Image (cartoon, rainbow, N blue to C red):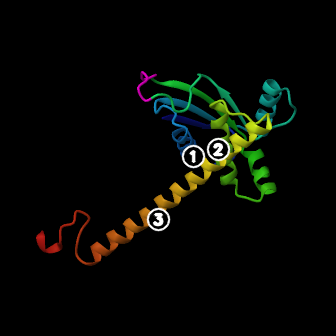
Amino acid sequence: MSIELFNESGMDAPEGQIIEVARFALGAMDVHRAAELSIQLVDNDTMADLHMQWMDLPGPTDVMSFPMDELTPGGRPDADDPGPAMLGDIVLCPEFAAEQAKTQRHSYEHELAVLTVHGVLHLLGFDHAEPEEEKEMFGLQNRILADWYDARELRVRTERQAEKDARLLRNIGFDATGDSADDR
């Protein structure tokens, strides 16, 4: 998957994490691996302009999604390969997200992860205008985030164990290739 991120917000943001969680969400939704996604981080004023222009609502918001092509999660395994497609654009407002994180009493990084997954789901056609839609979308969002955090924790534990194993092997005379010092 090709994911491009443009930070025009004037704020530091965990760009690698945003891309990572977007890629994870797209994979969890079985979006074709050749899909392309653009993520733009903007300031409050830019987001307020977009919010007014597209939603006719005043003031900034946290995330907006602009779908491009109609992509369906999953699909038939025997279907023709659809080829690359531009999924759309997600626009995040880190300044708004930072304030929202404070009121929600969680980290700024977590808030951006939530908003990224939320934006991906909107691009895929999910909405929360009706109670049943909201239940489905937020349930899916929470499951994807929980799975992403679990996968990250497993990766960190695996990397730590690999480092410990490599250190132990070095301490007993083996290098990274598994050769002992006596074999060289």
Q: Which residue is mark 1?
A: 21
Q: Out of 131 and 183, give the one closest to the viewer.
A: 131
Q: Quadrant of residue 47?
A: top right
Disc 2: CA contacts within 10 A as few (<14), some (14-19) or many (>=20): some
**Mark 1 falls on what kind of element?**
helix
Between discs 3 and 2, the one toward the N terminus: 2
Kind of residue sitting beneath label 2: Leu
Q: Is residue 14 visible?
A: no
- Residue 175, percent across and down? 24, 68
Q: Out of 11 and 37, give the one closest to the viewer.
A: 37
Residue drawn at 80 percent across, 31 percent down: 51
Residue drawn at 48 percent across, 61 percent down: 156
Q: Is residue 51 above or below residue 96?
A: above
Q: Which residue is mark 2?
A: 140
Residue drawn at 55 percent across, 25 percent down: 86
Between discs 1 and 3, the one toward the N terminus: 1
Quadrant the C terminus occupies: bottom left
Kind of residue sitting beneath label 1: Val
Give how far apart the Cα atoms at labels 2 and 1 are. 14 Å
Q: Which residues are magenta?
A: 77-82
Q: Which residue is mark 3?
A: 157
In the figure, is residue 53 to the left or right of 117? right
In the figure, is residue 49 to the left or right of 175? right
- Residue 71, percent across and down? 56, 26
Q: Quadrant of residue 106?
A: bottom right
Q: Is residue 78 magenta?
A: yes
Residue sticking out furthest to the right: 58
Residue drawn at 26 percent across, 64 percent down: 176
Kind of residue sitting beneath label 3: Arg
**Mark 2 falls on what kind of element?**
helix
Between discs 2 and 1, the one toward the N terminus: 1
